[in-house]
Amino acid sequence: MCSDVVTRFAPSPTGYLHIGGARTALFNWLYARGRGGKFLLRIEDTDRERSTPEATAAILKGLDWLGLDHDGEVISQFDRAPRHAEVALELLAQGKAYKCFSTQEEIQAFREAAQAEKRSTLFRSPWRDADPSTHPDGPYAIRIKAPQDGETVIRDQVQGDVTIRNDQLDDMILLRSDGTPVYMLAVVVDDHDMGVTHVIRGDDHLNNAARQMMIYTAMGWTVPVWAHIPLIHGPDGKKLSKRHGALGVEEYQAMGYPAAGMRNYLARLGWSHGDDEFFTDAQAKDWFDLSGIGKSPARLDFKKLENICGQHLSVADDAALLQELLAYLDVSGSDPLSDTKKTRLAAALPFLKAASKTFPQLIEKATFALIERPISPDEKAAKSLDDVSRGILKELTPHLQNASWARDDLEAAANQVAEAQGIKFGQLAGPLRAALAGRSVTPSVFDMMLVLGREETIARLTDATA
């Protein structure tokens, strides 16, 4: 066990927790938890115009729903701005960074001219090696002195070695002319100060690694282990967008996917352990390794997600499942359940969960336990409640009143009445379903009776035969 492993998830609070971000958080969580390490959370809220407290709350809520607990306090990147500036000034004092007095207008003019002449638009500041005595009094940015020859090699655990020529790197700004630190500096300083050993993030950050390594090297800090994971694509192979369906984690909760199934599915989205598709959290923590992450983008597949979720529902602990089901009803805008309905739902879970893949499917099958008298049967069920059927139900009612409320006795009573009427039990089952649930397709009539209890069962049969 490597207890010194420290990973982090560092979302920007500019919107919901994206499904891709959720998977990144999961990979970091699994890697740390499986090695007895720490999983830290940092909110990268330096973009003050777009960052909102509501988005931060949504991210925390999404992680909480997914069950991805973090260690320590949530770090705000914005709050650490003085520390970021301190590092920039330290590099300046060491001669590893310099004051750049070039204005935005000058830089823009250079780039436009370079484009017109079809040459590199990489800006080379004239102030890099300028004599300090020539410095004007105006505002300045602090730029790092990038290496000008040789190569930078990003040793990536997913992408392999990625080599970038140093003459392709510009002297990146560390501190803007208004004294605010740039994102690139903030990320490196935060990761170093938080003791992050492994940076596991989307491969859209791969090119950033070379620029961030300049800061690590200049400060003499240990470069973390890099692992840049491919993005998630839609079923059509294109970058995930709204047209593919849900994007935010909270949407998946509201759609009724259980969190355990979501974790399992997201873990398999771009990572594999042999041919294993279904696994527990404990197995995922034990198995997860960076070497199992593929280089190609993973494709979102709602059918696979549903199948995995169905397997998790079928083995879920009933008490925990009930709590998650109630939370789903809350976020989906349903009315709160009475204690009686909660009790019935809890009693029905053992036989409902194995036949459901999502919470909406489970609730649909549990309709018999959640509806109130008097029950209005649907059109198909009403047809099975003809005069003859109602007569048979009337005869069955006293037998049920006197039966002990156990499955064998209930079956015996129903079979006895069916036999006396010269019919098979199957012919009695339809009217029973209609009376107890108002539908023609339901769980077993005996399962329903056991959940409803003697008093409610008799009352529903009495209503149907009145």
Image (tube, helix red, strand yellow):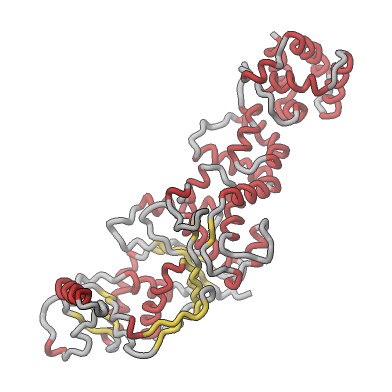
Front residue of 281 and 357: 357
Please report the residue visible at 33 percent of the width from the left and 87 percent of the height from the top.
Answer: 147
Front residue of 24 and 116: 116
Q: Is residue 382 left or right of residue 79?
A: right
Q: How many marks?
A: 0
Q: Is residue 209 above or below residue 202?
A: below
Report whether residue 317 is seen. Answer: yes
Q: In the rendered image, which quarter is residue 362 located in?
A: top right
Please report the residue visible at 66 percent of the width from the left and 61 percent of the height from the top.
Answer: 282
Q: Is residue 147 above or below residue 377?
A: below
Q: Is residue 151 above or below residue 251?
A: below
Front residue of 62 and 226: 226
Please report the residue visible at 48 percent of the width from the left and 78 percent of the height from the top.
Answer: 224
- Residue 175 placement (x, y as % from top left): 26, 74
Please report the residue visible at 31 percent of the width from the left and 56 percent of the height from the top.
Answer: 50
Q: Is residue 159 left or right of residue 388?
A: left
Report whether residue 340 is seen. Answer: no
- Residue 426 placement (x, y as % from top left): 80, 23
- Residue 24 placement (x, y as % from top left): 50, 62
Front residue of 363 and 161: 161
Q: Is residue 466 above or below residue 291?
A: above
- Residue 319 placement (x, y as % from top left): 66, 43
Tell me the quadrant of the picture where the C terminus can be found: top right
Tell me the quadrant of the picture where the N terminus can be found: bottom right
